[in-house]
Amino acid sequence: MSDDARPRPVTRADVARYAGVSTAVVSYVLNDGPKAVAPLTKERVLDAVRVLGYRPNLAARALSKGQADMLGLLVNDNRNPFFAELCHALDQASADRSKQLLIVNSDRMQVTTSEQIRDLVSRQVSGLIIASVLTAGEQALVETLNIPTVMIGQFGDTDGLAGVGVDFAAGARMGVEHLIEHGYTDIAFIGSAARHDGRERGWREALGAAQLTPGALVHTTFSYEGGYDVGQQLARGDALPRAVLAASDQIATGLLTALRQGGVRVPEDVAIVGFDGTTAVDYVWPRITTVVQPREQMAETAIRALLEPDTVPRYVEFATQLRVRESCGCSVTD
Amino acid sequence: MSDDARPRPVTRADVARYAGVSTAVVSYVLNDGPKAVAPLTKERVLDAVRVLGYRPNLAARALSKGQADMLGLLVNDNRNPFFAELCHALDQASADRSKQLLIVNSDRMQVTTSEQIRDLVSRQVSGLIIASVLTAGEQALVETLNIPTVMIGQFGDTDGLAGVGVDFAAGARMGVEHLIEHGYTDIAFIGSAARHDGRERGWREALGAAQLTPGALVHTTFSYEGGYDVGQQLARGDALPRAVLAASDQIATGLLTALRQGGVRVPEDVAIVGFDGTTAVDYVWPRITTVVQPREQMAETAIRALLEPDTVPRYVEFATQLRVRESCGCSVTD
């Protein structure tokens, strides 16, 4: 069928004529107000909408209303349990402020992150939350867009843009200090090779403060597989560390599974502390002791930084907490 | 500041004047085309955009271009690993077709699902994917919107709307039959009380076909906690079933953890088969044997049902597969 043969779009006036009401009444029904419509009339309008195949041009409506009550979130990979929980906390914090949240993944191969940021903004979001590490160019683009933006869960201060994060180095020190209190002296670190990740530094600092020699330093990917691969190598080798700080709960979980599968006991042979504080590591056995990022507080603060920027410092850094379970060697009763 | 005192919005013409270029050139820079702009000129335009605080009205642009290349996804809770993986697969399948995907959670307390569906549609999405169980009223609303819609992962045929799902009853039968092959006769089912969930029926059918009496039937929530609570009760009681089919991997994981914590061995005392085929249950120990929903195929088909509806039946039901690991009692080497 040629373009010319295409039937013209059904309009609100068509719906009004079919239903025998004014176009204003059609609007009241489709917008849930501002005036009430009698149930039978409403039924007649909805029937006309269905019969005629009318599709209200809601983008035009969003435009006429100006800014819509919607925030946009760019997240690297929604499958990572920490980011899944952070997304969910941001969704709740948005709802608390009567804002919707649109979530977009940034890890797809076919589309650049810049295009995804542009697309999100083109949806008339009134603010942008970035839970994905940006390149300098991407960050410059965001600054150009002149839209309130907050970076969340980055490796540190996000100069130029508002940010909410945790002190990764202090969190890592806390985890290592707990392992030292257990009497372990051979403490390895498994994390990513990211240069700005403070966790590796915190591990080193805590060992230095206790005058211990750093144990093995292993770089891997931030995933279950990343931890699993390292665990398989350790289980096969003859140089098991006595304890490990893993830079994420996913790494810790993969590590635990590979060690158990290889006949290594946790915590009797190797003690493990994870990082993130996800729910999932409370549902493996032994449950994993982990450095908790306060995601509800981070989410609430990020949303506030967007909506009431004057009440929030440009960069907010939260402290972490240790959630003690069995993987470090503690006995827990609950 | 009163409304009248608010400065008027900066326009594209202002940017052009400041940068000393035509408004067309400003458009080329902001739209990445259609004509190329010399790097220095581009720099000057971006500088003007920054200095003046210009924010292109991208919603107007989306409107003038007509339908934007964006699909909307409504999901019940993005933290559930199965839905997180399904979201991710849908995101990839959308990207394969050069479509963006906007994700919205539907489990928030403050906003009704209907409002969230309306909001998604008002973002000019060209299609809607629903991965959340709707009420009859919500489904009627969706039908009224006259936007291509596909339901994914529902309990069965989604009459009236296009749908993609799996045969839950056949999947459950497959899981139970595997447990029966191991020689277990006392096989319990742990699942939700949802009336339309075919998994409970499949469990019953498989036992009936093998002339076995149904074991315990326990209803709980679809969550780690739901499985954990049941596991704690079982571990404390004196009537352990020999084997369990859990209706989701999250339930299976919570169950496994509570049993291990309570000193019950898996699979030696209680064998477990889960349902979903999430990545996470390959990273607990013992790894959980599970009935796999083919999420990549489901996602690909759902996107095709939206974009090329004539090539896809109105309802597509996929078969499940069993992924055999150690929790059922099998020995696996990999």
Image: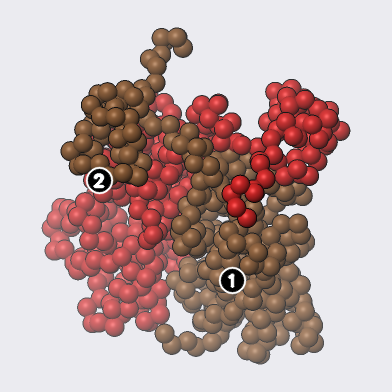
Chain colours: A brown, B red
Say if A318 sits above or below B54 in the image.
Answer: below
Asked whether A180 or B78 is in front, the reply is: B78
| Parent chain of label 2 | B
The tag on residue B137 is 2
Residue A61: give x, y in percent of width and height.
Answer: 46, 36
Residues packed near mark 2 inside 10 Å, few (<14), some (14 to 19) or many (20 plus): few
Label 1 sits on a secondary structure element that is loop
Residue B81: give x, y in percent of width and height.
Answer: 45, 57
Residue B307 appears in the rendering: yes
| Parent chain of label 1 | A
Asked whether A186 or A274 is in front, the reply is: A274
Left or right, B33 with respect to B291, comes to right
Residue A273 appears in the rendering: no
Q: Residue at x 49, y 76 (%)?
A: A287
Res. B110 image quadrant: bottom left
Asked whether A155 or B315 is in front, the reply is: A155
Say if B4 sits above or below A27 in the image.
Answer: below
Say if A16 sits above or below B248 in the image.
Answer: above
The tag on residue B147 is none
- The three-letter code of the residue at mark 2 reads Gly
Q: Mark 2 or mark 1, which is nearer to you?
A: 2
Q: Residue at x 53, y 42 (%)?
A: A66
Label 2 sits on a secondary structure element that is helix
Residues packed near mark 1 inside 10 Å, few (<14), some (14 to 19) or many (20 plus): many
Res. A273 image quadrant: bottom right
Check disc 1 and report the residue beneath it.
Answer: A293
Residue B3: give x, y in percent of width and height.
Answer: 59, 49
Q: Residue at x 83, y 30 (%)?
A: B20
